[in-house]
Image (spheres, rainbow, N blue to C red):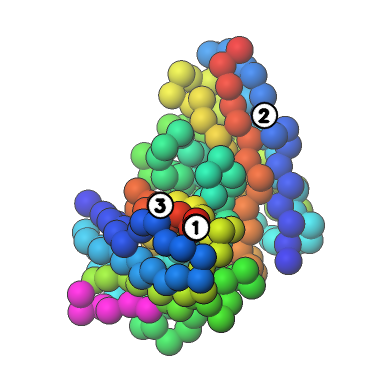
Amino acid sequence: EVQLVESGGGSVQPGGSLRLSCSASGFTFSSYAMHWVRQAPGKGLEYVSAISNNGGTTYFADSVKARFTISRDNSKNTLYLQMSSLRAEDTAVYYCVKSPAAILLLYYFDYWGQGTLVTVSS
Amino acid sequence: DIQMTQSPSSLSASVGDRVTITCRASQSISSYLNWYQQKPGKAPKLLIYAASSLQNGVPSRFSGSGSGTDFTLTISTLQPADFATYYCQQSFTFPLTFGGGTKVEIK
């Protein structure tokens, strides 16, 4: 059974940093691209970032570019999202999401984690 | 960026009704269109991928159609478990974008 379990969320002041982790199991983690999608309270879904199966290719939405980095450790079956210079508008539930392919585009999201809440507030 | 416009943003329907939700892309995305269902407090769940392919385990009352810029999600006979918010998403090009959602409520 595919499982994606996020951790690392919490409350942080504006300008602060936070690192999210996503522990994956039930599939060959190193074979698939992984993504982060967020959802502000009461709002819709917003795409954040992606990383190819081997970590060689990444993508960031303009809203987080230069502030967030994505990485993965295939030996630990873990995906990361390092967030810095956090703003109030980054407040959201962050979902770790799996793609059914190694590449970043053209495919859908077949499995989602339960999400972890990040709150940016003074 | 490709804008995804869903309509309606909400609807009220009764169990047994046929429900149709539309999604329009601001430019052609071929068939790279996916549909997700989200219930309150839960993660989204994939229903339909590549415009018309039913994800494993999803009831056959869900179907998708369309290509290019205009797409439709249809629930043939609405069930109590189907009251949720539905999102379309294009996977054709970055940034990947979602529609604003359609909330299906009980009449």
**A5 relative to A41 in the view: left or right:** left
Q: Position of residue B44 (x, y in %)?
A: 46, 45
Q: Position of residue A26 (x, y in %)?
A: 21, 59
How many angstroms separate mark 2 from mark 1 (CA)?
A: 34 Å
The numbered dot on residue B10 is 2
- The region drawn magenta spans A71-76
| Amino acid type for the residue under numbered disc 3 | Leu
- B4 is within the stretch colored magenta: no
- Residue positioned 57% across, 71% down in the render: A64
Is residue B32 among what the camera can see? no
Considering the image in quadrants, where does the C terminus of chain B appear?
top right
Residue B77 image-quadrant placement: top right
Under circle 1, the secondary element is: loop
Residue placed under numbered mark 3 in the picture: A117
The chain under label 1 reads A
Nearest to the observer: residue A17 or residue A50? A17
The numbered dot on residue A122 is 1
**A20 relative to A108 in the view: left or right:** left
